[in-house]
Image: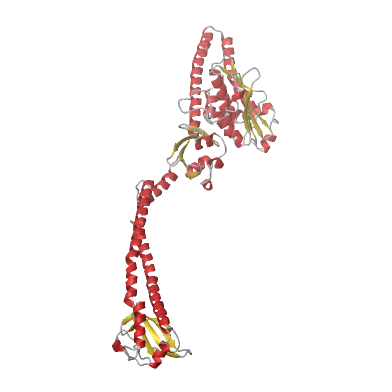
Amino acid sequence: MVQLAIATGVIALATGLFLAPLSAQLDDQAMRRALAIAQTTAAEPHLDDALESSRPSRHGPVQNEAERIRAATGAEYVVIMDKRGVRWSHTDPDEIGHHVSTDPSVALSGQEVMQIDEGTLGRSARGKVPLRDEDGKVVGAVSVGIAYESVQERLLSTVPQLLAYAGGVLAVGALAAYLVARRLQRRTHDLAFSDISALLVEREAMLHGIREGFLALDKNGHIRLMNDEAQRLLDLRAEDTGRPLDAALPPGRTTDVLTGRASGADLLAVSGHRVLVANRMPTDDGGAVVTLRDRTELERLGRELDGTRGLIDALRAQDHEHANRLHTLLGLLELGLHEEAAEFVTQAVGVHRATAEQVTERIHDPLLAALLVGKATVATERGASLSISPRTHLPDRLVDPHSLVTILGNLVDNALDATSGERDAQLEAEVRAEGGTAIVRVSDNGPGVPEERRSEIFTEGWTTKEPPRHGQRGIGLALVRRLAERYGGSAQVGERPGGGAVFTVTVPDALSEELSGACGTAPQETVTETHAPRRAEARTQGPEGATEAGQ
């Protein structure tokens, strides 16, 4: 209706603007026609002689010539006057011999006149020209009139035709407005403008209020819309809106998942140090909508849950072993073998103390030390042996110990899973500093990694294991690589001498300058004594520390 109203108004305005100059144009044409007839009449030969040699009468030669011209041209009147302004011809013979009703001075002065004026015959379009003799002397004037009613009739006769054209244009405009309105309704799903405005406000509030990342892509893969959470999870900027997704994100699995090159539901991706779950749904216009959930905390809790379950199993086994040792000790005491009983207790306690002291003497950071002590206990209960490499030595107060804890914990867990079910399973962990660079190496005597699969093992979602109950696998090694690359390092896998796999992770700038310079300068006894309290402190640092406390 709005489009129809606009089209009708525009057509009415255009019609009015056309009629206004048309009326003036018809008036001008009538006056020019009258002037042309007057000029033709004044050019008639012997008319000036008849005007000078006869008297004005209703049957005189001037009257007869004027009436002939009037009848031939269709003019309303042809009036010929002398220099005094007295008529020598007129449509009404009774007016002959009388003075003209309008001022003839301009024409008698030798000038031509065009005008719309009132006379004895009513309103008319007039043309007046001087009448000259053979010498060019003005002897009179000729006045020709075109009835103004005929001009109005011409104007009115064009109105129906003009209205017909306007009606046709209006019909075409109405049809176009209808088609546009129907197309607009289909595109907007029959929503009114007020509903669209309300939906836009609600969409903005929803997009920026939800805690899930939202990304809308057009059919060409350009970012059409994203909310604040998507910017945070993918490290994007508001300026990236409109850019191709491949240009806004680095190449990798995350980009493949978001662009649809990797298909599936609840696909895992790693962005920086975040673990994301992505779902991509195509839209009718060829684009897609991607939702992102941050599972970093959930994955961390899941790994902690796995560690806690492993710790519980280890504690349950230790409780069973402890009961057996108590029964053995009770039997030795009842048999009176006191020296054997004391030796048995010393040996049982010394094995665990030696393991803890071996770790803390070489790794001075409490978080990493507690992690290795706990992992050694879990490995023992799972029938594997976790040893510390003689080259291991790491000073205290790393720049980011939590990143190294994540790297080392994932590598050890991966090695434990790889050697699960192996007889005489052996693992070796090495953590050392070279200047400011930390090097983490974990090896196992499991089946190893085929050379053709080594480029895929650090890819998100790649795994050969069954997923746990709390989520999916294929995240740990991907996180290890991302953490290493975030510091400018690398993660590699190779073959262990004698069979198995060796994972090596290099983390540059992991130690501050003063600490890296002090690496390896403290005496062994001093280091052990100094960090003994920290071992106790590590027992309160988290699940890994709780492992040592349980031991």
- What number of labels is visible? 0
Give x and y (percent) for residue 113. 42, 83
Would residue 405 be visible to someone looking at this image? no
| Image location of residue 263, percent across then percent down | 48, 32
Left of 338 or right of it: where is 263? left
Q: Nearer the viewer, residue 381 or 219?
A: 219
Q: Is residue 427 above or below residue 139?
A: above
Q: Residue 229 location, x and y as percent?
A: 48, 42
Is residue 291 visible to the viewer in this orientation of the structure? yes
Which residue is the extreme one toward the top?
335
**Picture quadrant of residue 503:** top right
Colour mapping used in the image = secondary structure
Using the rendered view, name the quadrant where residue 20 is placed: bottom left
Q: Nearer the viewer, residue 360 or 241?
A: 241
Q: Quadrant of the C terminus?
A: top right
The spot of residue 289 in percent (x, y) is 45, 40
Report the front residue among 236 and 300: 236
When the figure is inspected, residue 279 is found, relative to residue 497, above or below; the finding is: below
Quadrant assignment for the N terminus: bottom left
Quadrant hosting residue 332: top right
- Answer above or below: position of 439 versus 26: above
